[in-house]
Amino acid sequence: MAAKGSQPIETRLFINGEFRESSSNKTFDVVYPYTKEVVAQVHEADVQDVDDAVAAASAAFPAWRDLGVDGRGALLRKVSELFLEANDELARLETLCTGRPISQYIDAKISSERWRYFADGAWSMQGTASTNTPGLLSMTVKEPYGVAALIIPWNFPLIMFSMKVAAALAAGNTVVLKSSEKAPLTSIAAAKLIQKAGFPPGVVNVIAGYGNPTGEALASHMAVRCISFTGSSLTGQKIQAAAAKSNMKHVHMELGGKSPAVVFEDADLEAAAKATQFSIRLNSGQVCVANSRVYVQESVAEKFTELFRAQFSQFQFGDPLDPTTQQGPQIDVLQYNRIKEYLGIGAKDGQLTLGGDANDGFFVKPTIFEKVPEDSRLMREEIFGPIVAINTFKTEEEAIQKANDTEFGLYASVFTNDLDRAVRLSKALQAGTVGVNCTSPVNAKDAAFGGYKMSGIGREGLLYSIDNFVQTKSILIKA
Ligand code: NAD
C-alpha cells in the first residue's frame, strides 16, 4: 500500500530474514491521526508467528554470538549508514503513524548515532580474573542471554527500536522486536534496512501486533531469556508477571512518569519558564519525561506563571506533514478521550488558567491548571498530553515533599542559582535523573537513563544498555 504519494509501505512481518504475511492473514489499520485516513494495513503476528520468530532467533544465536564484537559491529555500522540514507522515508512513516510534526524529526539521525555507538560498545563486556585462591584461576565473564524480546511503545518508535535492537545485538543476542500497534511502520522499515545490511537470517525478527496476543506470547515465551520493555507502568507490571510466571526471564523496564519541576525564587525565571513549558509541549505532551507537575515558590509564582503562560500559549496546530506545523494532534481517539477526561478532572479539582479545550481533530490546546489538590488524579496519574499543573510551595522541605509524593520517579528538575540548594535537591529528589536548571535533554551518549519507583527497573543509555543484555558467568580453573 502507498500513502501520500511515496514508496509503497511494507506491512509484513520480518521473520528469519524474510518478509511474510501473518499466519492468520489478519491485519490491523494504521491511521494518520491528522486526517484519520487508514495509511496501511499491517500484518498482526499471532502466537504461531511469535513461535516462528523466536525459533528463528534461537537458531541464529550461536553463530551470531560467535561472530565476535568486531564481526557484529561491522554490520551495526552498516545499519547506521543506511538509517541516514533513509532519513526522509523514515520521517514520513513516523509522522504518518504518530502525528508528531515532521519539523521535529531528528530520530533517524539519533538512531544512526546509536547504531554506531553500540557497534563499538560491546567491547565493554569485560569481566575480572583472580589468582587469589591458591591453585585456582577464577574468571568472571559476560555472556549474552540468547534470544532477547524487545517491546516498544508508539512515542519515538524508531529511537526506541534502535536503543534496544542495537544494544542487544552488539552484546551477542538475537532479537524479536514487537512494535506498538499504533506505530509499527518505522520498525518494519528498519527491518528492511537490516535485511539490506546483510544480517544473517534470524538474527533480527520484527513483528507487529497488540499486547494481546502478540506481546503476551512473547513475554511468556519459554525460549526467550530476557526482555527489554518500554511503555506504561501498568503494562510493565503485566510483562513482569508474565516473565516471572513463565521462565523467570530477566526484565529491563523503562516505564511511565509524572515528573516534577521545582522552581525556586532565586532561579532565572525566564529560563525556567522556557524550559518547563517546552518539556510539557514537546510531542503534544506525549513524552515520558514531560514535567507535568511544576512547583514554584510562592514569592515568584505570579511572575513565573505569567512567563510560562506567555510562551505556552504560542502554538500553531496543523498537518504534521507540513514543515511549518508546530503542534500535531494526539496520537489517537483513545488517547484523546483519555485527555478529555483529565481536562474534566482538572476543571473540577483545580483552577483552569489556560486552554482546557480539545477538538475532534484530536488537538488539545496547551492547558494550565493551578491550585490543584495533591491528591487529585490530575497530580497522580500520567496524562500524556499538553496539560500542566502549576502549584506553589513556601519552603524547600515542602517542595521536596510534594515533588516526591508520587509513585513515579523518572525525571525531576530543579531551577535555582544557589549551588548548595542544587546539591541538596539533587540528592533529595527521588528520580532516575535529576536536571539542575534543565528539563529533559535526554542523551544516551552522556548519561544513563531510567526510573526510580514505578518508572522502571534497570537503565538504558551508554554501556548500561549493554548490561541489560548480558549475564555473568564465573569460570574456576583448578591447577
Ligand atoms: P503501552 O504500555 O500501552 O504499550 C507499550 C507496548 O507494550 C506496546 O507495544 C503494546 O502493544 C505492548 N503491550 C501492551 N500490553 C502488553 C502485554 N500484556 N504484554 C506484552 N506487551 C504488551 O504504552 P504506550 O501507550 O505504547 O506508550 C506510552 C507509555 O510509554 C507511557 O506510559 C510513557 O511514559 C512510556 N514511555 C516510557 C519511556 C521511558 O523511557 N521510560 C519512553 C517512552 C514511553
Image (cartoon, rainbow, N blue to C red):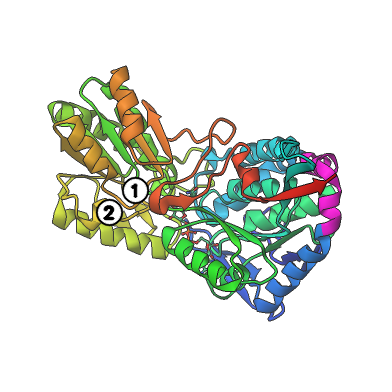
Where's the C terminus, which quadrant? top right
Farthest residue to the front: give it. 134
Where's the N terminus, which quadrant? bottom right
Instruction: Tell me the residue that label 1 is attached to.
Output: 258
Asked if disc 2 and disc 1 are in contact, CB closer than 8 Å, the reply is yes
Q: Main secondary structure of the magenta part?
A: helix
**Closer-to-camera residue (415/357):** 415
**Closer-to-camera residue (106/141):** 141
Q: In the picture shown, does residue 406 fall above or below 448?
A: below
Q: In the picture shown, does residue 310 fall above or below 241?
A: above
- In the figure, residue 50 lies in which quadrant? bottom right
Under circle 2, the secondary element is helix
Residue numbers of the magenta segment: 62-77
Under circle 1, the secondary element is loop
Q: What residue sits 44% from the left and 58% below the top?
A: 232
Q: Position of residue 237 (x, y in %)?
A: 45, 64
Q: Is mark 1 within 8 Å of ligand 1?
A: no
**Residue 405's disc number:** none
